[in-house]
Amino acid sequence: MNDDPTAQATGDDRHARYLTGTEREDRLLEERIADIRRREVPLVLPTSNLGGAYQVPPSITTETIAHLRRYRVTEAVCFWLGTPGAEQRARISEIWVPEFTATPVSYDIQPLEMLRLKQHLDEKSLALLVQVHSHPGGAFHSRRDDLNAASPWPGFISVVVPDHGNISGGFWESVEIYELLGSASWKHLETREKLERFHDH
């Protein structure tokens, strides 16, 4: 009979003793994701600013372009976080860059990153309002983009930036903006509406 307690432990138990702090944190997050999925609780809670306006400080668009330009070959993505205001006027206050993998024509964010985002939103009392990603050429919403929204809720905004962020004109004049109506159905904002609803003051 072997009285060594490690001999009685399972392989998983023995491995758990040697997990680093980061590995333990990742495992706990993965367990939380599994629990959320079992209970069918959305990772991103509903925040609707459907048809509303957005105040976006110039520092946000400047930081966004700098981030996208770092990826010269692949697409890149980031999120704009902020607070929905009164009278359908939301204010963007922060950029959040998830860990992602990308190709020249797509990007992917792991569910673990979305849970980290949710924790950040809870801690800062912010909401996920906008996703921004780059294209290697023209700015448009592909079918993959239609189905790959970070939030499923109507009013969520998707901004597509052309040419890996290497734009020569103004930010709002150069990008294309889409608003989620629900069920992977998006509205493309024409120039006039785009400039009326998105501004830096």
Image: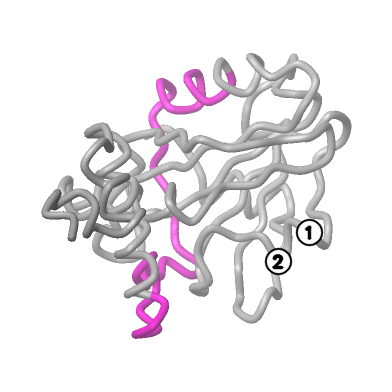
Determine the secondary structure under disc 1: helix
Quadrant of residue 29 within the rendered picture:
bottom left
Most foreground residue, 158 or 72: 72
Amino acid identity at mark 1: Arg
- Residue 144: numbered disc: 1
Q: Which residue appears at 73% of the width and 32% of the height?
A: 75
Amino acid identity at mark 2: Leu
Given the current orientation, which residue lies at the most extreme front position? 1
Residue 42 falls left or right of residue 69: left
Q: Which residue appears at 26% of the width and 32% of the height?
A: 20
Real-space Cα distance between discs 1 and 2?
Answer: 5 Å
Q: Tell me where residue 117 appears, x and y as whole percent.
A: 35, 48
Residue 30 falls left or right of residue 21: right
- For the C terminus, the quadrant is top left
Residue placed under numbered mark 2 in the picture? 147
- Residue 58: numbered disc: none
Q: Tell me where residue 123 appears, x and y as whole percent.
A: 15, 48
Magenta segment range? 37-65
